[in-house]
Image (tube, rainbow, N blue to C red):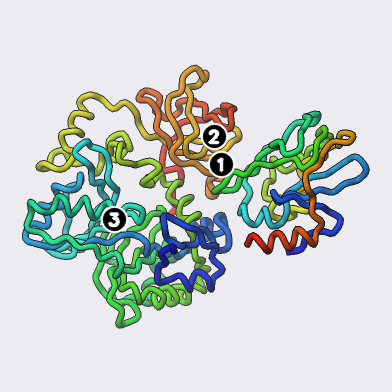
Amino acid sequence: MRFPENMKYTKDHEWTKTEGKLVTVGITDHAQSALGDVVYIELPSVGRVLKVGETFGVVESIKAVSDLYSPVAGKVTQVNSSLGDDPAQVNKDPHGKAWMVQIEVSESAPTSDLMDAGAYTKYVESIK
Amino acid sequence: MLKRTSLYEEHRLLGGRLIDFGGWELPVQYSGVMDEHEACRNAVGLFDVSHMGEVHVEGPEAENYLNYLVTNNVAKLAIGQAQYTTMCHPSGGIVDDLVIYRRGPQRFLVVVNASNTDKDFNHMKSVSGQFKVQVTNESAHYSQIAIQGRKAAAIVAQIASAALEPIKNYWFVESQVLNNIPAIIARTGYTGEDGFEIYSAWEKGPEVWRALMKAGAPYGIKPCGLGARDTLRLEMKYPLYGNELNDETNPLEAGLGWVVKLDKGNFLGKDAMIRAKEGGLSRQLVGLKLTDKGIPRHGYAIFNSDGSERIGEITSGTQSPSLKQAIGIGYVKTGHGKIGTQLLVEIRGTKFPAEVVATPFYKRPY
């Protein structure tokens, strides 16, 4: 399982891609594999303000319901609405087409501990 | 230390994702729940169900004993025939749902849920003293493999000695597979598809499994885990003990009145069931589908159409792979269960529209 180098990762198996003040968030290949076939996804509305660690949505597989936690504090600027009609994208392209939200981070707001690709790979190995 | 069936190594070789299922280490999936579910519905799937419990019942009063123990009428069972039934407490609550196979005039195989094996055996023993019958727990000596789907018969025919055509639904033969492995080959199952459950000696399980996988390869056979087993039975509205049925549930409210024969002699729970029927049932088990979005899950509350009254709760729910929509089973207050009734299901604080529908949800096309 390969995790893109240009992303940072959380212990809850989310990835973040930062461009200036904009952070795009999704779930990792490990997360989608653990979930199984994704059949339903609930994402917030644009404009929603999030704290670090706050639940911003839900992703459901046939068997399980899994909360999505915001890795940063800020305001939701974009939401990937195509996932509503095609939740299977999360299994097919978790690091690319299945991005979930884009958040504009607040100034000097705390972020959760983020790992680089190498550290996340080790972390995934350790919990297997 | 989790219990393992004799097929544990087969599951590992096939890449099964092993989980703790009621103390057993079994695969929840191999290639994926959706993929396995579709394989079973379109061709054939293979299931290790060796964790189920098997109890031998034999003796001069075996039939009378079983007829006192269970709600269905065992006297109607012919040799070579199987019967689905419940067995109840005197209160009318369900101890378990089970299948009885009649092997001889006074010789039966009783197959119970894996999660209830000890409880059921103790219950069966506690009642047996009044009858000339021997009741023994043989679960550790059986492997049980289910092969389900329209291609199942063609595959089993390649390894079974007996002809399968004469075995109708809910009948079985005592024969052999692979020429020298004694096996009970039963046309029973928990998926709604045509298929068989093959009972053989515990240590013979791997040989039977591998032979079925090999013979099934040209037909597209796939090993199926507990995840697909659940979505398949849910689409048929088959109850699952622990979800739809428990010690406090009455078979009548669970829609199992068809296996409760009040016109036979006395049986455990009979009085309670007569009282329940005369008094009117307070709730009923229904199937429903979500009208727009949302997936119902066990424990979610059900409300009436304007949301003013909580009228029940979901016992099982999922996104149906075959129907491609969210379906659920649940109990609702009597009067709210007619087909077409509009309801609401509360999911994470929001109420989503749903409708009572006819069941089974899935109708097989052959």
Q: Give how far apart the Cα atoms at labels 1 and 2 are.
A: 7 Å
Q: What element carries label 1?
A: strand
Q: Which amino acid does label 3 sit on?
A: Asp
Q: Nearer the N terminus, badge 1 or badge 3?
A: 3
Check contact, mark 1 vs mark 3: CB within 8 A. Answer: no
Check contact, mark 1 vs mark 2: CB within 8 A. Answer: yes
Q: Give how far apart the Cα atoms at labels 1 and 3 are.
A: 37 Å
> Which disc number belongs to residue B325?
1
Specify the subunit that label 1 lies on.
B
Q: What element carries label 3?
A: helix
Q: Is B279 rendered above or below residue B317?
A: above
Residue A89 in view (yes/no): no
Q: Is B295 rendered above or below residue B116?
A: above
Tell whether A34 sits left or right of B340.
right
**In the picture, residue B152 is in which quadrant?**
bottom left
> Which disc number belongs to residue B290?
2
Specify the subunit that label 3 lies on.
B
- The image position of residue A95, as x and y in percent, is 78, 53
Q: Is A74 rendered above or below residue B87?
A: above
User: Which quadrant would the C terminus of chain B be assigned to in this image?
Assistant: bottom left
Q: Which residue is drawn at 28% across and 51% down?
A: B119
Q: Which of marks 1 and 3 is in front?
A: 3
Q: Which residue is drawn at 47% across and 64% down?
A: B44
Q: Residue at x 37, y 35 (%)?
A: B285
Q: Nearer the viewer, residue B365 or A5?
A: A5
- The image position of residue A69, as x and y in percent, is 71, 41
Q: Is B200 rendered above or below residue B114?
A: below
Q: What element carries label 2?
A: strand
Tell whether B276 sits left or right of A8.
left
